[in-house]
Image (cartoon, grey):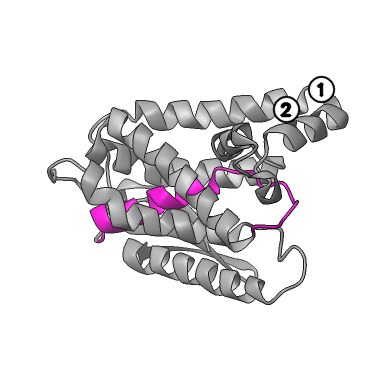
Amino acid sequence: MFPLRDTVRARSFPVVNWLLLGANVAVFLLMTSGGLGSFERLTARFALIPAQLAPARPLEYATLLSSMFMHGSWFHLLSNMWTLYIFGDNVEDRMGSGRYLVFYLLAGLAAGLVQVSFDRTSVIPTVGASGAIAGVLGAYLILFPRGRVITLIPLFFFIQFVEIPAAFYLGLWFLSQLSSGLLSLGAAGDFGGIAWWAHVGGFVFGVATVVLFARRPRVYRQWYADEYWPW
């Protein structure tokens, strides 16, 4: 399943969401501008490496923040940014720009800490905005449980566009991350190259704290099937 958009119309321009999208793209362009050697050096310096976090090295904790703006490849970057583009605007609309920014950063920090707690001795660099974005998904689930996600589903040689309830789509996504995280506990080495527990931690943070950031409910207009093409 590939999400194309949701059916909830935002009532205000998502300034912070666009700034976050731009910041992530800018950081990736900066990291790749100097070639592979420069990319690897920057990753080694600013990525989150659980085994390097220690009270004796307090500056290493800053990588919990820096790593959430770094990505390992174009596909990694674009898949994360597309998800943030789809779901982030509505969450910012409900929270307000300032609170949304604080929420996003805290979700990313919480996600990183959860990943570290489950993989304390890892020396593998961890990068990506997916932990913070998972927090946005958790918040979306609580704020817009009746929303729907227009999803592309390839069936052999046919492509189907299907409206899936957001609660089902996000719930299924969370269960897939949780099950993969549980499987990774018994695996030796890097399990799939994905920080599963960062996703779980970010999502749970979003679900648990969204009420602290959201403003009063507003009336949102849904998109209907005859108002979008092909979604």
Instruction: Give the SS element for disc 1.
Output: loop
Q: Is residue 123 above or below residue 90?
A: below
What span is colored magenta in the figure?
120-145
Residue at image location 22% in from the left, 35% down from the top: 11
Contact between marks 1 and 2 (CB within 8 A): the answer is yes
Name the amino acid, label 2.
Met
Instruction: Give the SS element for disc 2.
Output: helix
**Residue 208 image offset from top left, x and y in percent:** 30, 57
On the image, numbered disc 1 is attached to which residue? 34
Name the amino acid, label 1.
Gly
Query: Which quadrant of the view contains residue 216?
Result: top left
The answer to which of 40 and 55 lies nearer the viewer is 55
Residue at image location 81% in from the left, 35% down from the top: 40
The answer to which of 74 and 71 lies nearer the viewer is 71
The answer to which of 196 and 143 lies nearer the viewer is 196
Image side of residue 205 versus residue 117, left or right: left
Q: Is residue 147 above or below residue 182?
A: above
Q: Is residue 56 above or below residue 172?
A: above
Query: Which quadrant of the view contains residue 55?
Result: top right
Residue at image location 57% in from the left, 74% down from the top: 182
The answer to which of 191 and 136 lies nearer the viewer is 191
Residue at image location 27% in from the left, 49% down from the top: 210
**Residue 116 image offset from top left, x and y in percent:** 59, 54
Disc sitting over residue 31 in the figure:
2
